[in-house]
Amino acid sequence: MLARGALCRWAAEVPKQATHDLPKLASLVQTAGTGVSLPIRTLSRLAQLQVRTYATETVKKAVKAKAAAGESVKKTTTAKKPAAKKATKKAAPKKTKKKAAAPKKKKRTTSRPKKPLTDSEKLNKSIAQLRALALRAPVARRGLSAFNVYVAENVDKNAGSASAAMPSVAAAFKDITPAERERLNHLAAERNEARAAEYKAWVESHTVDEIRIANNARRLLRKKLAERDSLAGKAPTARRPANTDHIPDDRRVKRPLTSFTIFFAERSSSSDFKGIAVTEKAKLIAEEWKALSASEKQRFEDQNAAEKQRYARETSES
């Protein structure tokens, strides 16, 4: 065993140690200071420290000698792993200013100006517009007669012209028996009833305003068609064109009749004007109205007042 003094003298003689060996040497000195004897094997550790120190000094001297001789010295260092490359963001492409588009050249319009419509073309265009507003009924409002039923049963519409067969059919109708006429009258009444129901359903499928607009269009349409016929040189007829009759609508409140209208309806229904044309009859009735005294007109004035009250009541209820 070594004494404390001998250990201190030995430590003083030991060359300088590396920094990482100093903790071990300090531990040995502290142990010796406490009076604890160190085992012999500890000396081997101290010898190892000394040898390591000498080896380090020898290596340093050899490195310095080689450096002085100009020889290259390779340091043995631990290979470092290559650092992972940082992901670099791609630079956004620079925005290039768009060149201002050149102004487009105006195309030359080669279309010719529209020709102004002639009077006949304007008339036909107006008639087409009125027909669209006038509405088209699914069945005619006029009632069927026994003759209409007889013609429908005896004229084959698919065999040539039906108008050519009409004279013979009309002559045969005059010779039918009373029983046959009764049968035809019965069929005509049934068909008229069915047609009236269909016509009423068609009217009620439209609003009151639509029927009112259709009646106004039909009234104007009759005038336009008459004007076209006169330009074409056709003679006027008493029969109205199809789909130009007034459409009766029970839902609409009837306007109050004037005193003259009441007088005209009463006089025109009498037998005094039988066989007189409508225009002549209207002139005669107008002259009679002017010739009436105030007391004679009072009866029609009272009826006109009652009509106004009825109109006001019905409009308030609707």
Image: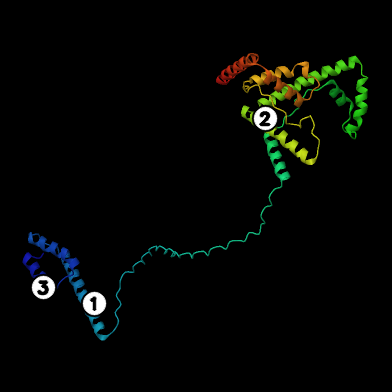
Which residue is the site of mark 3? Answer: 13
Q: Which mark is residue 59?
A: 1
Determine whether label 2 and label 3 are within 8 Å by CB: no
Instruction: Give the quarter of the figure containing the C terminus.
Output: top right
Q: Nearer the viewer, residue 45 or 107?
A: 107
Q: Position of residue 114 (x, y in %)?
A: 67, 52
Q: Is the residue 32 above or below the residue 309 in the image?
A: below
Choose mark 3 or mark 1, whichever is in front: 1
Q: Is residue 28 shown above or below 77? A: above
Please give the name of the residue rendered at 87% of the width and 25% of the height, measured from the top-left corner: 151
Q: Position of residue 304 (x, y in %)?
A: 62, 17
Front-most of residues 285 and 45: 285
Residue shown at 67% from the left, 21% from the top: 290
Question: Can you say which quadrant of the picture contains the N terminus?
Answer: bottom left
The image quarter containing residue 237 is top right
Which amino acid, by three-letter code, is at mark 1? Val
- For residue 134, say whether it is visible: no
Residue 23: quarter of image = bottom left
Which of 21/90 is in front? 90
Sequence-wise, the earlier of marks 1 and 2 is: 1
Task: Provide the secondary structure element on which disc 1 rests.
Answer: helix
Image quadrant where residue 123 sits: top right
* Disc sitting over residue 186 in the figure: none
Proximity of marks 3 and 1: CB atoms separated by less than 8 Å: no
Q: Is residue 14 left or right of residue 115?
A: left
Residue position for label 2: 215
